[in-house]
Amino acid sequence: MACEFGEDDCGELLKLYRRGKKLGSGGEGQVYLLSARRRAGKKYAGKSVKSMRNAENEARLMSKLRVCPGVVAFEDFVREREAGRCYGTIVMELCGPSLAERLIQGGAVTEEEAAKTIKTLAETLKWMHLRGVVHRDLKPHNIFQRLNTSAVDEVVIGDFGMATDKQWDMQQYCGTAKYMAPEVVAVKSDGARGPRASYTAAVDVWGLGVIAYELLSGYRSRVEFDFLRARAFPSDLASCEAEDLIQGMLAVEQSKRVTLDAVLAHPWIVKHCGSGEILTAMPYRRRHCGVKRKFSGIGKDLIVKKILAG
Ligand SMILES: Nc1ncnc2c1ncn2[C@@H]1O[C@H](COP(=O)(O)OP(=O)(O)OP(=O)(O)O)[C@@H](O)[C@H]1O
Ligand SMILES: [Mg+2]
C-alpha cells in the first residue's frame, strides 16, 4: 500500500517548493503540485517515492533522458533523510491529463490523431533506446498530454519507475499485466522452471502496439489483450494500413515484431504525418488485408464467455 507523505515529512522539499494539491498516486508514492519558492513560483509536479533506491534510479534515468523532447522533463531531485523518513522527491515538468483519462472520457480518436500520437511516441522511444533506456511500463496512464494543449498527439512519456538501462534487469517480470509483452509474461513461468530468458527493448514496441489499438478502439478490457497475446486479432478495427502496423507491433515473436524505424516508415504513419523521404525504406507488406481474421464480432464475444467460464 502506498504511504502518505504529510507536509511534516517534507522538510527539505518545502525549503525549495510550496506543495499544492495532490495530482495523483500510484504503487510507489504520490505526486503533488509544487511551486518553486524562487523562479517566480514556477509550477512543477513532484513525485515522492517511498524507497530512496527506487527514487534515485527513476531520477537518474529521467536525468539521462533530460534533453529528449518527448520525455517528461526532469528538473530536480530532493532527498529527505531525517530520522523516521528516508525517501526522494522527483521534481519534473507539470503535465496535463494522461492519455488514459483522455481515452476513458473521450473515447477513440481519429486515425490521423492516432498516427500522429504513435509517431511522436515511436520517435521518443527510439531516442530512449539509443541511450540504452527501456521503459517497460508503457501504457496510456504513463503518457501525458503537454500542459495547455488539447492536441491529442502532443504527448510526453513519464513514469520511469519500471525503466532500466541495465541488461541484467531484462529478465525481470515487471510492467502492467494488460500491456505486458508475451516474452515478459513468459519469464514468470520460466522462473519456476529454471533460468529465465532475457527479453529486449522490443517490449516497448509491444506496449506501443497496444496503445495504438486503444487509441483506435477506445479503452479496452484486459481480456481482449489476452487474445492479442494469443495471436487473435479482431477484424474491422480500422483501415487496412493501421491494422497492418498494429499487427506488426503486436507480433508475438520478438524477432518478427517491427522495429521503431519500420514503425516510423510505415505507410499509415507517412500518410497521416507526411514524411515523404522515409517511404523508400518502407518494409510494408499488406500482410493481413483481405485475409480472414482469427475472430470478429459475435465470435469474439463467444470466446470471451468461454474463457471467463473456463
Ligand atoms: N508530470 C506530471 N504532471 C502531472 N501529473 C502527473 C505527473 N506525473 C504523474 N502525475 C500524476 O500522478 C499519477 C501517478 O504517477 P506515476 O504514474 O508516475 O506514479 P506511479 O507510482 O509509478 O504509478 P503506477 O504505479 O500507478 O504506475 C499519474 O497517473 C498522474 O495522475
Ligand atoms: Mg504510472
Image (cartoon, rainbow, N blue to C red):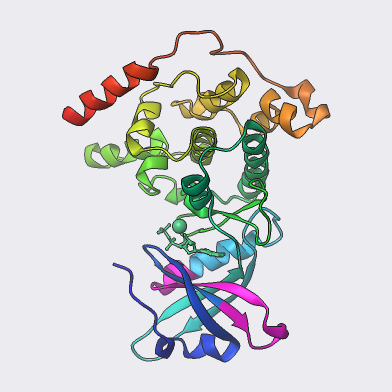
> Quick check: 293 left or right of 130?
left
Name the residue located 39 percent from the left edge and 84 percent from the top edge: 6
Residue 41 part of the magenta-drawn span: yes
- Picture layout, residue 82 above or below residue 193: below
Residue furthest out toward the front: 106
- Picture layout, residue 89 above or below residue 206: below
Task: Judge whether residue 166 can be spotted in this image.
Answer: no
Residue furthest out toward the right: 277
Where in the figure is residue 192, as x and y percent of width and height? 22, 41
168 and 75: which one is in front?
A: 75
The total number of labels drawn is 0
260 and 199: which one is in front?
A: 260
Task: Judge whether residue 63 can be spotted in this image.
Answer: yes
Q: Quadrant of residue 113?
A: top right
Residue furthest out toward the left: 310
Name the residue located 44 percent from the left edge and 26 percent from the top edge: 252
299 and 208: which one is in front?
A: 299
Where in the figure is residue 58, as x and y percent of width and height? 51, 64
> Quick check: 248 left or right of 234?
right
- Quadrant where the image shows the N terminus: bottom left
Q: Quadrant of residue 287?
A: top right
Where in the figure is residue 32, as x and y percent of width and height? 50, 74
Where in the figure is residue 84, as x and y percent of width and height? 33, 88
> Quick check: 246 left or right of 131?
left
- Which portion, as a residue range, is magenta? 34-55
Residue 204 part of the magenta-drawn span: no
- Quadrant where the image shows the C terminus: top left
Name the residue located 26 percent from the left edge and 37 percent from the top edge: 189
